Image: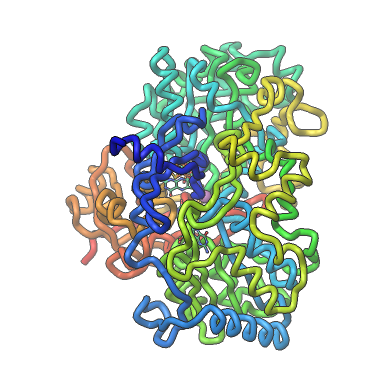
Amino acid sequence: MSSSQQSKDNRHYAVCPHDCPSTCALEVEKIDSQTIGRVHGSKDNSYTDGVICAKVARYAERVHHPERLMTPLKRVGAKGVGVEAFEPISWDEALDCIAERFKAIAAEDGSEAIWPYFYAGTMGWAHRGAAHRLRHAMGYSRQKETICVSIANAGWQAGVGAKRGVDAREIVDSELIVVWGGNPVHTQINVMTHIAKAAKKGAKLVVVDPYETPTARKADMHLMLRPGTDGALACAVMHQILKEGLQDQAYLERYSDFDSAVLEHLAAKTPEWAAGITGLSVEQIIAFARLYASTGKSYMRVGYGMSRSRNGASNMHAVSCLPVLTGAWQHQGGGALYGHGEIYKPMDAAYLHGLQLSDPKVRELDMSRIGPVLTGDPQDLGDGPPVKALFIQNTNPVIVAPESAKVRQGFMRDDLFVVVHEQMMTETAAMADIVLPATTFLEHDDIYTASGHTHLQVSKQVIEPLGECRSNHQVVSELARRLGVEHELFQRSALELVDQALANGDLPSSDEIHTMKGLDLAPDFEQAHCLNGFGHADGRFHFYADWAAQGDHSGTLPTLPDHAELTDETDSDHPFRLVTAPARTFLNSSFTETPGSLKKEKQPQALINPQRCEALGVSEGELVTLGNQHGEIRVAAKPFTGVQPDVVIVEGIWPNHAFVDGLGINALVSAEAALPNGGAVFHDTKVWIEKSG
Ligand SMILES: Nc1nc2c(c(=O)[nH]1)N[C@H]1C(S)=C(S)[C@@H](COP(=O)(O)OP(=O)(O)OC[C@H]3O[C@@H](n4cnc5c(=O)[nH]c(N)nc54)[C@H](O)[C@@H]3O)O[C@H]1N2
Ligand SMILES: Nc1nc2c(c(=O)[nH]1)N[C@H]1C(S)=C(S)[C@@H](COP(=O)(O)OP(=O)(O)OC[C@H]3O[C@@H](n4cnc5c(=O)[nH]c(N)nc54)[C@H](O)[C@@H]3O)O[C@H]1N2
Ligand code: SF4
Ligand SMILES: [Mo]
C-alpha cells in the first residue's frame, strides 16, 4: 500500500470544536490509539469544502503538547505561578476534596456562593453545557452569557426578529459581497473560499473594518471607518439610496414597517454628517451606496466587530436595515447572514443544559463582569453572598475577560476556592486550588451546531483519552454523584444525552448523523430569504427597534437606525480608540501555547498610524505604553498605514505574561455592560499612548 493510501485509510471524520462560525468538518489522520497526525478539511461537507485554517491543520501540536495536563493537580505553592506550584493527586482525592468544599461553602454561605463558570472552549453541546447541568441541579449561581454574542444578537433581533439568514453557499451566485465588521481570513476562513468562487465570476468584495485586515486587503473597496460608527455609515448609505430613489419600494412596503417618518429621519443623515463621525470621505460613502444598490444579488456577511461597543446593538440594527432597503433578501445570492441559530431549534438544548432542574429565582451573575463580581461589587452581588467558589470549564477568564487587573485581584482572594478543568496550564488554571485534566474533542463524543453553515454534526472519539484526562460530562457527573444528586443527566453517557435531545425534536440519532457525516438542516429558499416573513409577530422587518422588549428600559438606544453617542470617545487625555481584534493563528486564548501559532504571531503589537508613530517618536519594535482609567500596558509599536490616525489595533488575546509587565490587553477594556441586555465592549476603549520610558 502506498503511504498516501495508508494516510487516507487512517483518516477519521471529526468536527472542529472551536468557537468559530465555520465548525469545519475534519478528517483527522490517526497514527495509533493515542496519536494523531495532520488534520484536513473534509471535502464531503459542501461548506467546509476541503479547507480549514492552518492552526487546526496543526492540531497535533495542541493534543500532544508537552505541557498538556495529564493528571489532577492540587496547588501547594502560590497562586498564579504555574505548574511548579502544584502536585499530582488522584481523581478520587480531587473530586472528594471539591465535593467537600462545595458542601461546606453551600452550608455556610448558601448555594449561590458557588458559581460554575464556562464558555465555548468546546462548542460541543454535551460537554459545553456540563457546567449548566451541575449548576441547575445544585441551585448554584446562574451565569448570564454575555462575553460574545449578546450585543449582536440584540441588534439582529431588533430588526430581523430571528437568528436566520441566507446560506453562505449562495455566495457563489452573488454579485457583491459585503463583509461588515468581520475578518474572515482570520476568523472563519471558509467564507473566503465561497467569496473566491464568486470573485471568479466577477463579484466584488467590500469590507467595512477600522483597519486594513487581510480580508480588507482582498477587497475592491475597504471602508476604514472609526470603530463604533457603523450606525452613522449605514444611515448615510440609506440616505443616499433613498435620495437617488434606488430603494425597492414595493419590497419595503410588503416586508417592513418603513414609513414616512423613517424616510424623514433618514433625510437628515447625510453623507456629510456621517463623514464627520466615521472619518470616511463623502465620496467613499456615496460610492458605496451606489455600488450596494446596483444589484439585488448583494450578500452581507455580518460579523461581531461592530457590536462590541456600547452602541453595538444599535449599529447592528442599522446595518441590518440595508438589505431590506434594497430588497436584496428576495434574490438568489442576496440578503444577509449573521447566524443560523434558529434552524437548530428542534434539538432540545434545554434538556442538555438541565433547564428542567433550574430555579429561575437563583441569582444570575454577568460573566463579562467577573472582575467586579469577584471583587464584591454591590452592583453585581446585590443582597446575595460573595462568590466563594468557582468551577470553571472551557474558558480562560484571567486573560479573556474585561478589566483583567480586577479579575486577577478577585482570583487572588484567599477565601475563594477555585476549580479549573483544563487541557493546558492556562493563567486561569494557575490560579486554581484544584486543576483537573480535560480531554480534547478527539478524545470524546459530542454534537455540534454551527452559526456560519447549516449542518448538524456528530463527532466521535478518535483516540483514547491521554493520560488521566476526563471529559466535562464525566467530571460533572462524578461530582454530582458525590453531591448527592440522582438524575439521568448524570447517569447517562454524553451521547445518550445527545440522543435524548435529538429524539425530543424528532431528529435522527447521533449514530445516523455521524454516519452521514452531518445532517444539512438548510431551510428552503422562502424561509432562508424571509419571503415567508421576518421573525416578528407581524412578519415584517422592523426599522423601529423595540429595545425595551430586550431590556433597555431607559430609552437610551435610538429606536430608529442612528449613530448612538454612547462610545468611550477620545478626549484630550485619551486621543486614541483601541480595537482588540482576533489574531489569525490564535483562537481567543487557545493556540497561544502552540509553537506553530507563536512563530506566526511573534509578540503582542500595537498597530499605530505612521504619522502618530513619528509624533510619539517611536519606531518599529520600540515599546509604547497604552493606558486609561483601568490600567496601563506596555507593548511593541508597529507603524501601520491601514488605520486612521486616532485608532490603534492590538490583535490577539495573548496571555498576560506575554506582555512586558505581565498585564495584557483586557486590562484596558471596561467591564461596563452594553445595552440593551449586557455584553462586553472589547472594541470600545479610549486610551493614551506614550513612548515607554
Ligand atoms: N483566528 C481566530 N478565529 C476566531 C477567533 C479568534 O480569536 N481568532 N475568535 C472566534 C470567536 S469567539 C468569535 S466570536 C469570532 C469573531 O469573529 P469576527 O466577527 O470576525 O470578530 P470580531 O472580534 O468581532 O472582529 C472582527 C473585525 O471587526 C473589526 N471591528 C472592530 N470594531 C469595529 C467596528 O466598530 N465596526 C466595524 N465595522 N468593525 C469593527 C475588527 O477590526 C476586526 O477586524 O471569531 C472566531 N474565530
Ligand atoms: N480583548 C479581547 N478579549 C476578548 C475578545 C476580543 O475580541 N478581544 N473576544 C471575546 C470572545 S468573542 C470570546 S467568545 C471569549 C472567549 O474566551 P475563552 O472562552 O476563554 O476562549 P477559548 O480560548 O476559546 O477557550 C478557553 C479554554 O477552553 C479550554 N477547553 C477547550 N476544550 C475544552 C474541553 O472540552 N473541556 C474543558 N474543560 N476545557 C476545554 C481550552 O483549553 C481553552 O483554554 O473571549 C473574549 N475576550
Ligand atoms: S476555520 Fe474555525 S472551525 Fe474551521 S478548523 Fe479553523 S477554527 Fe475550526
Ligand atoms: Mo466569541
Please give the name of the residue rendered at 77% of the width and 40% of the height, measured from the top-left corner.
506
Quadrant that contains the C terminus: bottom left
Quadrant in which residue 482 is drawn: bottom right
Position of residue 119 in the picture relative to residue 199 (left or right): right
Q: Position of residue 662 (x, y in %)?
A: 33, 70
Position of residue 651 in the picture relative to residue 455 (left or right): left
Please give the name of the residue rendered at 73% of the width and 68% of the height, measured from the top-left corner.
363
Position of residue 152 in the picture relative to residue 294 (left or right): right
Position of residue 579 in the picture relative to residue 505 (left or right): left
Residue 62 visible (yes or no): yes
Q: Position of residue 353 (x, y in %)?
A: 70, 57
Q: As displayed, is residue 211 above or below residue 416? A: above
Q: Position of residue 386 (x, y in %)?
A: 64, 79
Q: As displayed, is residue 423 above or below residue 384? A: above
Quadrant in which residue 514 is drawn: top right
Between 502 and 128, the residue placed more toward the observer is 502
View extreme (right): residue: 537
Quadrant in which residue 562 is drawn: top right
Please give the name of the residue rendered at 53% of the width and 69% of the height, measured from the top-left corner.
371
